[in-house]
Amino acid sequence: MSFEEYAALARQLAEQRRAGERDAAAESERRRDLHAAVDYLHQRLTAQGHRLDQLGRAIGIDQPPTAPATGPGQPGAATGSGPAEGSAWSGQAGGSAGSGHPAAGPGSGDGVSGGAAGVSGRAGVGAYPQLPAGAARLALPTAVSPTGAGVPAQRAAAADPAVELELARRLADEADRHGQQAELLAQRPALLPTWSPLARAVAVYAGCAVAAGVLMLTLVLASGVGLVDGFTLGAWICAGLPALAFFGGYLVLGRWGRPAMVAGTPPRYLPLGFLICFLLVPAGYCGYLLLFRSLR
């Protein structure tokens, strides 16, 4: 080999070594990027899990209990062949041990034993192990051929980690979007969710005052037939029914007007509710008197 050829070969080897180093550096950078993406997704999924736990506790859903793992010593665990199974299998493999004649195995058919499994009495030789039906089906994946014979299935192609991480990132973004929607829904109360807190409080107190007005009409009719005297009717109209309406609205706002997730206690507008209830019920009674007198 001449010096020029040796120099060209050395340059070619040096170029291959530099190309290998560049490929190794690029692969190392790719692996670092993949590890960083995996760590970022892990942090996002952990935060999403904590947030979902908070949402579940807020709406009263607990985590389902995990099923205990079954082991060989626990009840219900799947075990292999028991004593009865083993004795039955060894009896089939060894033939009729009581008569001393070996059983003919699946072989030549002339009474000669079919291998080591058919020989009885040989030390250290037992029956061939037999897998259960389910394990035998899972042992070797098969694909159906046009002729009907089972052939080994082809191995699935290896997934690209970058593609899988991108898919996981998209799913995490979708989970974030659904989580934000769930938080918005959890921040709305069950009673009149689209209304403002002030409008909801006014509607609740006014509704309770109207219900108290219906009771007031019942008391007025009872007073007309002599079942309720005038002092009792006045006490209920001026104090009793407005107080019932006020406390009824207060309890309704506390039970159905409170969002599932809210920081602090939502306002119930107590002065406004007191004013509405203690004005509407007597005003309703005065309106009833004016209407009754105008009709007379």
Image: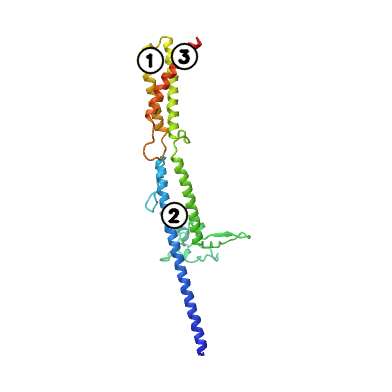
Q: Could you say which quadrant of the image residue 246 lies in?
A: top left
The residue sitting at 46% across, 17% down in the picture is 287
- At label 1, counting other C-alpha atoms closer than 10 Å, the crowd grade (few under 14, some 14-19, many 20 or more) is some
The residue sitting at 48% across, 83% down in the picture is 10
| Relative to 53, residue 123 above or below | below
Callout 2 amino acid: Glu
How far apart are labels 3 and 2 at the CA level? 97 Å
Can residue 40 be seen here? The reply is yes
Q: Which residue is mark 3?
A: 290
Tell me, for residue 85, which label it has, or none.
2
Callout 3 amino acid: Leu
In terms of secondary structure, where does tag 3 sit? helix
Between 242 and 130, the one nearer to me in the picture: 242
How far apart are labels 1 and 2 at the CA level? 91 Å
Tell which circle, 3 or 2, labels the residue nearer the N-terminal end: 2
- Residue most extreme to the bottom: 2
How far apart are labels 1 and 3 at the CA level? 16 Å
